Image (cartoon, coloured by chain):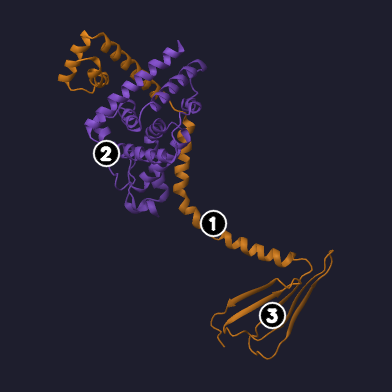
Chain colours: A purple, B orange
Amino acid sequence: MKGGALAFVTMEQTVDGPDSRTHADDLAAFETIMRQYERLVLVTAYRLLGNMEDAKDVSQEAFLRLYRNMGKASAAQNYQAWLYRVTVNLCHDAGRRRKPSVAVEDVPELVSPAAGPQESLAGSERQRILQMSLRALSPTERDAVVLRDLEGLSTEEVARALGSSEATVRSQISKGRVKMRNFVERYFRRRV
Amino acid sequence: MNCADWEERVALYAGGDLPPAEADEVERHVADCAGCQVLLSGLRESLALVRDAHREPIEEAHLASVRARVLSELERPARRWRWVWLPGLVAVAVVVLFVTLWPRSELRMALPPPASPSAPTVAKVVSVPAGPVQRTVQTVRTVPAPQVSGSIVVRLETNNPDVVIYWIAETKGETK
């Protein structure tokens, strides 16, 4: 069994011994980890790609890779950094395979319909503005802005995830912020 | 120095990405520059807007669908072995159907002799009457085994001269 050699230990679990674990135990433990990071991976992929179906494909592949590499990404605090790095790389691969689209019609599907219609409408519009303003950025600026401004990583963490220098990331962030601000301004000016 | 030279630093300042000394410098400039005040206020508003949008709850169905796809993929290796016999079963079913339903077929089964290759014997004749189509299955005779020793050759002949089926089976421990 492929996963048998891996040690899936979460905070909530105790393990009797290496031989007592089954494939089902491994999957249950992995599902706990997946639930912890699924939003991070899916939303990051969606922000970078602008398309929910592609984002789901990327998320699926990211978690399958995590499962196969659990031994390497052993410490729980590394899962997040590892997943950001893999997600960004998978998005780059997916982006090369297809032309990025604004996919405005996809935007409202991200928001939970739990809110009332009025709030949902406002939420949909905010989502649309966010996705469209991200499309106004270059891919490298988008990577940096999504990780720094939306996901809240430090500049150092962003640089590590993107395999870049902090100076480069700071430059990408500042350019991206100015472009987003210009887009938002134009968007509301047109509406007025 | 005009406002364009300050744009990058003001943008970093808006997100709290400048070290204290540089941040103080930007604050002093912004206090005296109307253009940079507008820029800073616009940057803060757009940042707040996109951050709020990003924090909005995501539909659980999207997360559940990814989870289900991943878990299903991880469970697959165990399932694959469980169904490995299925193609064989389908092949056998196809052969049985072919033999039983072939229209007006007369099937001859030739078996190699177990002991005496020179004594062909009529083993059995089975007639299947009734039905609009007469079907006869004959186990006619045994014939000397072909050159391959230790094997049984079964030949099925049908009315269609283009269709002849051979089954070759190895026997264990009887290599006369």
Looking at the image, residue B172 lies above or below residue A170? below
Q: Which residue is mark 3?
A: B110
Give the letter of the chain under mark 1: B
Image location (x, y in percent) of residue A181: 34, 19
Foreground tag (1 vs 3): 3
Give the residue displayed 22% in from the left and 30% down from the top.
A167
Q: Which residue is mark 2?
A: A163
Give the residue displayed 50% in from the left and 15% down from the top.
A118
Q: In terms of depth relative to the viewer, which is nearer, B24 or A140?
A: A140
Query: Does residue A154 appear in the picture of this structure?
Result: no
Residues at marks 1 and 3 on the same chain? yes
Foreground tag (2 vs 3): 2
Can you name the residue that lies furthest to the front here? B1
Among the 4 quarters of the image, the one containing residue B70 = top left
Q: Which residue is mark 1?
A: B83
Q: Give the crowd class for mark 2: few <14, some 14-19, many >=20 residues within 10 Å.
A: few
Give the letter of the chain under mark 2: A
Q: Secondary structure at mark 1?
A: loop
Query: Does residue A23 appear in the picture of this structure?
Result: yes
Q: Are the residues tagged 2 and 1 within 8 Å (C-beta)?
A: no
Give the letter of the chain under mark 3: B
Image location (x, y in percent) of residue A60: 43, 41
Give the residue displayed 51% in from the left and 26% down from the top.
A105
Q: Amino acid at mark 3?
A: Ala
Give the residue displayed 19% in from the left and 12% down from the top.
B29
Q: Amino acid at mark 2?
A: Gly
Among the 4 quarters of the image, the one containing residue B41 = top left
Looking at the image, residue B16 lies above or below residue A69? above
Foreground tag (2 vs 1): 2
Q: Secondary structure at mark 3?
A: strand
